[in-house]
Amino acid sequence: MKNKTISFKVSPEEYGIITKFFRRYGARSRVLREAILEKAKAEEERKKRVTAKLFRALDALPFSQEEAEKVIEEGREDDYFS
Amino acid sequence: MTISVDTGFILALRKRHSLTLEVWKKVLDKKDELVVSVLVLSELYRLYLKAGKPQEGREVVESLKRTASIKGVDEELSLSAASLSHREGIPLVDSLILCTAKKEKAKRFYSSDRSHFEPISSHLRKQIKIIFV
C-alpha cells in the first residue's frame, strides 16, 4: 500500500475523537498527534506574527484615537451630509 | 459568525481593551469571519499618509488582508448605501462601510463611531447588531 499524506484542521475535541478512532483500529496515533501538535504550534506562531505586525504598525501612528477620528472625518468633508 | 468593523474599530485596537482584543482573537482563531470594506483600508492608509508613515500604513493593510475578507463596492452596494445615507443622514462613507457588512450578512458590526451609528442602530437591529467599542 502506498503512503499518502493528508492535511486537515481539527479542534481539540475532534483530535480526541480521531485519536480514539486510530487507537481502536491500531493506527499510529502518536505520529498523528505529533503532526497535529506541530500544525497547531505553527498556527499559534502565525497568529502571534500577524498580531505583532499589526499592533506595531498601529502603535506607530502618532495620533490619539480622537485625533485620528478627526482626520478621518476631514476626509469625508465633501460628503453630502457632513 | 460573520462580523464586520469600521476604521475606528481598527484604530481602537491600540487601546488593547478587552472587547476589541476578544473580537480580534476570535477572528484569528477562525471562530468569527471578518469582512471589511475596502474603504476602511483606504481611510486607514490615508491616515498614515497624513502622518508621514506610508510603510506602517502598508503593514496595517497587509495585516488586515491576511485576516479579513476585503470587499469592494459594486453597483447594488453603492445604491443601497446612497439610500441609507440619504434616509438616515449619515456620511456616504459610513453608509458604504455599514452596507458592505449588511450585504455580507454580518451579524455584528463593531464601531467607535457613536455619533453616526448610534441613532440608526435601533432601526437596523433586525438586520445587524451595531456594537460600540
Image (cartoon, coloured by chain):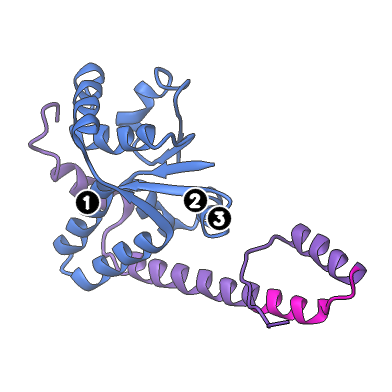
Chain colours: A purple, B blue
Q: Which residue is mark 1?
A: B43
Could you tell me the amino acid type at mark 1? Glu
Query: What crowding class fits label 1: few (fewer than 14 Cα within 10 Å), some (14-19), or many (20 or more)?
Result: many
Query: Of the numbered discs in the image, which one, if any, rests on residue B20?
Result: 2
Q: Which chain contains the residue that carries disc 1? A: B
Query: What crowding class fits label 3: few (fewer than 14 Cα within 10 Å), some (14-19), or many (20 or more)?
Result: few
Res A25 → quadrant: bottom right
Q: CA distance from mark 3 to mark 2?
A: 16 Å
Q: Which residue is mark 3?
A: B30
In magenta, the rendered stretch is: A25-38
Q: Residue at x 21, y 21 (%)?
A: B83
Observer-nearest of B54 and B63: B63
Precedes in sequence: disc 1 or disc 2 = 2
Pinpoint residue B72: horizontal percent, then vertical percent. 25, 45
Q: Is residue A71 left or right of residue B34?
A: left
Could you tell me the amino acid type at mark 3? Lys
Q: Residue at x 15, y 68 (%)?
A: B52
Query: Above or below — where is B132 with respect to B87?
Result: below
> Magenta segment: does it hold A31?
yes
Q: Are marks 3 and 2 on the same chain?
A: yes
Could you tell me the amino acid type at mark 2? Thr
CB atoms at circles 3 and 2 under 8 Å apart? Answer: no
Q: Residue at x 59, y 72 (%)?
A: A44
Precedes in sequence: disc 1 or disc 3 = 3
Q: Which chain contains the residue that carries disc 3? A: B
Name the magenta segment's main secondary structure.
helix
